[in-house]
Image (spheres, grey):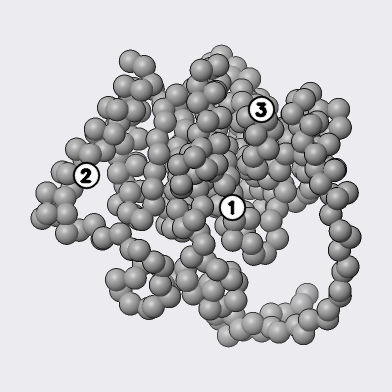
């Protein structure tokens, strides 16, 4: 079965399940209707009041902007499925799923898409099931990054790599370097007790091909070698934490609050979260990475110098939930 007919079968199955649930709930009364505008109003029927409270608390200036963004999620395994669910709960505008699944996993996936559609019917989905590393599919993958935005013909805002192998990561890296597309990479180590996320802005920060030692440092190289007969460990907790820090970084990046991490690691054994930022390698093997670096340098040189005005801010200690004073040790 080719990928087009697989997708058709998938869509058919989702429709069947939706109809079945609607019947079960008596004419589809169970699923809430789409909501045109996010409102801060606090009432039971408003699923967005707590997200919109972020605005009132002064964390996010314009939370409702979340609905204007499209994120492409590549890979729907341990990290990708949790990532997709969180983005759905956050009310993202649209998600483009790209993954490769074998037939026997398809019904699991249709159940999953059905599940997240029910969480938030305001989110739009686009689903493609194929291996992005083959020549034909790679072109289609590039096209969906370029034109698969909320408004057809516009690019997606961010690509998230939730894949588990080196080849697929390199394919995403190649596509994003060529298109100048910002993306975030995620990974969990073979022993399941460490992981990382990385923000890659072509030309501005190190790409996946710029810094192979990062792959080694994150200990994901062994898994990518796919050694015969060796089964990588997996912990849903580590996957969940990595998905959590990934989506947190996505929200900060898209909604412009807090500090966006270029690299954030997670070491579960010591509960250690290392961060760093890496400049791109001028000798990167990817020619489009080198081209993007030149363009970034020109763009920076053309920008007027910013005058930094330092302001002293009054430090206000916020109340904590427990009414206790924090003590210094
Ligand atoms: Zn590079």
Front residue of this view, candidates 145 and 85: 145
- Real-space CA distance between mark 1 and mark 2, rounded to the nearest whole angstrom: 29 Å
- The quadrant holding residue 249 is bottom right
Residue 230, can we see it? Answer: no
Mark 2 lies on residue = 18
Mark 1 lies on residue = 250
* Element under disc 1: helix
Picture residue at 59% right of the left edge, 19% below the top: 226
Residue 326, can we see it? Answer: yes
Picture residue at 86% right of the left edge, 32% below the top: 282
User: Position of 196 compared to 72: left or right?
Assistant: right
N-terminal of the two: label 1 or label 3?
3
Q: Position of residue 220 (x, y in %)?
A: 66, 31
Front residue of this view, candidates 271 and 316: 316
- The quadrant holding residue 125 is top left
Q: Position of residue 296 (x, y in %)?
A: 80, 43
- Image disc number at residue 177: none
Crowd band around label 2 with a 10 angstrom C-alpha radius: few (<14), some (14–19), many (20+): some
* Element under disc 2: helix
User: Position of 119 compared to 84: left or right?
Assistant: left
- Image disc number at residue 174: 3
């Amino acid at each position: 079965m080719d990928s087009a007919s697989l997708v058709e079968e998938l869509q058919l199955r989702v429709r069947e399940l939706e109809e079945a649930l609607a019947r079960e709930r008596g004419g589809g009364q169970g699923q809430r209707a789409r909501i045109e505008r996010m409102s801060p109003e606090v009432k039971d029927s408003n699923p967005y009041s707590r997200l919109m409270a972020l605005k009132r608390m002064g964390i996010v200036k314009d939370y409702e902007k979340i609905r204007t963004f499209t994120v492409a999620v590549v890979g729907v395994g341990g990290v990708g499925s949790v990532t997709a669910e969180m983005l759905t709960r956050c009310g993202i505008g649209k998600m483009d799923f790209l993954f490769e699944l074998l037939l026997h996993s398809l019904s699991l996936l249709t159940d999953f898409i059905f599940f997240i559609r029910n969480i938030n019917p305001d989110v739009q989905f686009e689903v493609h099931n194929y291996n992005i590393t083959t020549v034909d599919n790679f072109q289609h993958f590039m096209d969906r990054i370029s034109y698969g935005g909320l408004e057809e013909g516009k690019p997606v805002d961010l690509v998230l790599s939730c894949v588990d192998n080196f080849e697929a990561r390199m394919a995403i890296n190649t596509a994003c370097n060529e298109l100048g597309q910002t993306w975030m990479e995620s990974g969990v180590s073979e022993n399941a007790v460490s992981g990382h996320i990385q923000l890659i802005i072509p030309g501005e920060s190190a790409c996946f091909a710029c810094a192979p030692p990062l792959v080694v440092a994150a200990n994901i190289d062994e898994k990518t070698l796919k050694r015969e007969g060796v089964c990588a460990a997996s912990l849903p907790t580590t996957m969940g934490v990595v998905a959590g820090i990934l989506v947190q970084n996505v929200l900060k990046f898209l909604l412009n609050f807090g500090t966006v991490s270029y690299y954030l690691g997670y070491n579960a054994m010591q509960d250690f979260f290392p961060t760093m930022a890496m400049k791109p390698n001028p000798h990167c093997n990817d020619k489009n990475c080198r081209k993007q670096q030149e363009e970034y340098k020109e763009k920076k040189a053309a920008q007027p110098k910013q005058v930094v005005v330092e302001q002293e801010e009054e430090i206000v200690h916020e109340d904590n939930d427990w009414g206790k004073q924090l003590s210094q040790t």
